[in-house]
Amino acid sequence: MAALTPEDLFQLHPKIRMGAMVDEKGEVYFLKMRPGVKSLAPEEENRAFLQINPLVVFGACERFSQWGGAVTSVTVRYEKVLMYLARLKGRFLMLTVEKDEALETIPEIARSIESLIRKLAD
């Protein structure tokens, strides 16, 4: 699979605020805010969150997987933003999205990500 970049993610939808990718060992491949968008948290907090929390969130959700099937993504709704986590071949993709219209936007973004991943795999 070719390398996925934050710019690839930002092109998917104008409501994506931040894009990040980390592996299962906590190695951060990228963590970037959309140009012109200010982060709600300091970068070191974003990086620390990214290094451990996707594993914790997915691990908690996977406790139910024997009944519900494999966990492919998780969405967390904060007061100010919506965070979308997806597992991609041993890595975790994390996006934050502007809260307004986020519930309608996430399925569209998820389909776009799946399409982009297929294209990069070719």
Image (tube, grey):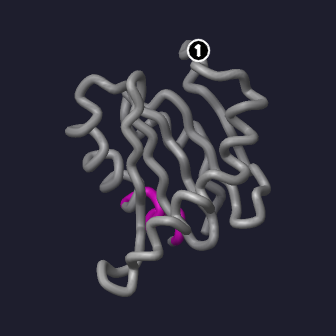
Q: Residue 54 lies in magenta, yes or no? A: no
From the viewer's perspective, is residue 95 above or below residue 53? above
> Which quadrant would the N terminus be assigned to in this image?
bottom right
**In the image, residue 102 lies at what x, y percent?**
29, 33
From the viewer's perspective, is residue 8 above or below residue 73? above
From the viewer's perspective, is residue 2 above or below residue 98? below
Residue for point 52% across, 64% down: 58
Report the predominant secondary structure element of the magenta stretch.
helix
- The residue range painted magenta reads 115-121
Q: Residue 117 lies in magenta, yes or no? A: yes
SS at mark 1? loop
Q: How crowded is mark 1: few (under 14 residues within 10 Å), some or many (20 or more)?
A: few
**In the image, residue 78 lies at what x, y percent?**
41, 31
Is 36 or 115 nearer to us in this picture?
A: 36
**In the image, residue 50 lies at what x, y percent?**
67, 46
How many numbered dots are placed on residues in this image? 1
The answer to whether residue 55 is left or right of residue 108 is: right
The answer to whether residue 74 is left or right of residue 43 is: left
The answer to whether residue 10 is left or right of residue 98 is: right
Residue furthest bottom in the image: 66
For residue 90, what is the image quadrant? Answer: bottom right
Specify the amino acid type for callout 1.
Lys
Residue for point 55% across, 25% down: 34
Residue for point 59% across, 40% down: 6
**In the image, residue 40 lies at what x, y percent?**
58, 19
Residue under numbered circle 1: 38
Residue for point 41% across, 44% down: 76
